[in-house]
């Protein structure tokens, strides 16, 4: 293990890789990251599958085996096969950590982001199709996604809640999670191996807010560049601590073996070259969190990251950043609402590309 990734893990952060492909699994790359860089889980999303499935070659054998199936069936078979194989690689870690880590996430079709009933239906189908206890089903934290999150958890299915940008929505996600676990308990499910994370997106907040600060052009605005995303995430961690400590339902569920829904820092690749390439890792280190990193960020952390605890004691400063943004006329809710809408749209665009690429593959191998 590298010193920096080990230090980050020792500080309470579970390092998950934000990437998956057939090539990564079959080449041994994933096993290497587990062995040498403290990787204990994987997340996928439509953009990651678009990148993987656009490659000519790695999926041809399975496509040929599937024959002239419809493209939706082919996509389901290809993606769940990758996730199933990855969960098998992580099974030992899952068992050693009592299923806290060793998780691999797969996302429902992003076109269902505003369709509660079909999100719930597909979440159950994906869970059954992958058929591994250390899988997680990703559901976006849209308003329509919230009841689907509760309903999916109520069936004993582990959930990764994705596309969270605002503190307001995060609080709703925690409530949906606790209600879902309570229903799972009432339905007789064993809570001990159920897991959930709340994927709070980070760097995109700076990309959006910095643009507004640059437009403002004042010295006060310039001083706030690169501070909004970390402040927002740190306040999410403060909310995580407060909500689980204050909710009487949670204490009773925890006594039955339920595990807290951990905050997961997503979108942690640095998009502004002026900032440290470890910024959204090193500035968000605390116990009971996950950081899912693209490989470039993981390599940067391994090479020159810090990994020391960096959230505790920063709440007052983080509130001050948000207050100063408001004083400058920046409405953070407007920013995060747009980021959620843009995030859903970007994943739908990626999914459209997945459909085109897989259809091309079906046609190619059956020519």
Image: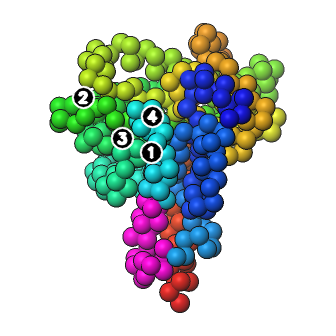
To which quarter of the image does residue 291 belong? top right
Of residues 148 and 284, the one nearer the viewer is 284
Q: Mark on residue 96? A: 4
Spatial CA span between label 4 and label 3:
18 Å
* Other-residue count near label 2 (Cα within 10 Å), few / some / many at <14 / 14–19 / ≥20: many
Q: Where does the image place residue 154, in percent across and percent down from the top left? A: 25, 38
* Residue depth check, mark 2 versus mark 4: number of the one nearer the observer: 4
Disc 3 element: loop
Residue at coordinates 38% horizontally, 41% vertically from top-left?
Answer: 159
To which quarter of the image does residue 21 belong? bottom right
Q: Could you tell me which quadrant the N terminus lies in?
A: top right
To which quarter of the image does residue 4 belong? top right
Spatial CA span between label 3 and label 2:
14 Å
Q: Mark on residue 91? A: 1
| Segment colored magenta | 62-81
Spatial CA span between label 2 and label 4:
26 Å
First of labels 1, 3 by sequence position: 1
Q: Relative to residue 66, is residue 126 depicted above or below?
A: above
Does residue 312 appear in the picture of this structure? Answer: yes
First of labels 2, 1 by sequence position: 1
Disc 1 element: helix
């Amino acid at each position: 293990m590298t010193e920096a990734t080990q230090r980050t893990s020792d500080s309470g952060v579970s390092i998950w890789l934000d990437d998956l492909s057939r090539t990564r699994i079959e080449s041994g790359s994933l096993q290497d990251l587990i062995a040498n860089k403290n990787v204990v889980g994987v997340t996928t999303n439509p953009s990651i599958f678009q990148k993987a499935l656009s490659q000519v070659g790695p999926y041809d054998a399975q496509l040929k085996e599937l024959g002239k199936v419809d493209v939706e069936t082919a996509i389901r078979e290809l993606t769940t096969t990758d996730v199933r194989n990855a969960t098998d690689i992580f099974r030992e870690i899952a068992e050693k950590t009592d299923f806290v880590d060793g998780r691999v996430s797969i996302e429902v079709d992003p076109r269902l982001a505003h369709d509660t009933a079909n999100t719930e239906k597909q979440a159950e189908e994906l869970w059954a199709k992958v058929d591994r206890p250390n899988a997680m089903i990703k559901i976006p934290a849209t308003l329509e996604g919230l009841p689907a999150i509760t309903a999916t958890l109520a069936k004993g299915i582990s959930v990764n809640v994705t596309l969270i940008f605002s503190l307001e929505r995060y609080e709703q996600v925690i409530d949906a999670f606790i209600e879902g676990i309570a229903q799972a308990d009432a339905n007789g499910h064993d809570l001990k191996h159920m897991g959930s994370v709340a994927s709070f997106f980070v760097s995109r907040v700076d990309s959006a807010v910095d643009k507004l600060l640059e437009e403002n052009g004042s010295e006060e605005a310039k001083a706030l560049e690169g501070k909004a995303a970390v402040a927002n995430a740190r306040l999410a961690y403060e909310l995580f601590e407060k909500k689980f400590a204050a909710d009487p339902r949670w204490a009773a569920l925890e006594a039955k073996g339920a595990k807290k829904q951990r905050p997961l820092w997503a979108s942690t690749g640095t998009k502004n070259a002026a900032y440290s390439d470890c910024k959204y890792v090193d500035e968000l280190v605390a116990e009971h969190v996950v950081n899912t990193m693209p490989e470039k960020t993981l390599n940067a952390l391994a090479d020159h990251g810090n990994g020391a605890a960096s959230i505790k004691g920063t709440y007052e400063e983080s509130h001050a950043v948000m207050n100063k943004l408001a004083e400058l006329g920046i409405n953070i809710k407007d920013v995060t609402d747009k980021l959620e809408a843009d995030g859903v749209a970007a994943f739908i665009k990626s999914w459209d590309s997945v459909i085109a690429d897989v259809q091309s593959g079906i046609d190619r191998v059956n020519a």
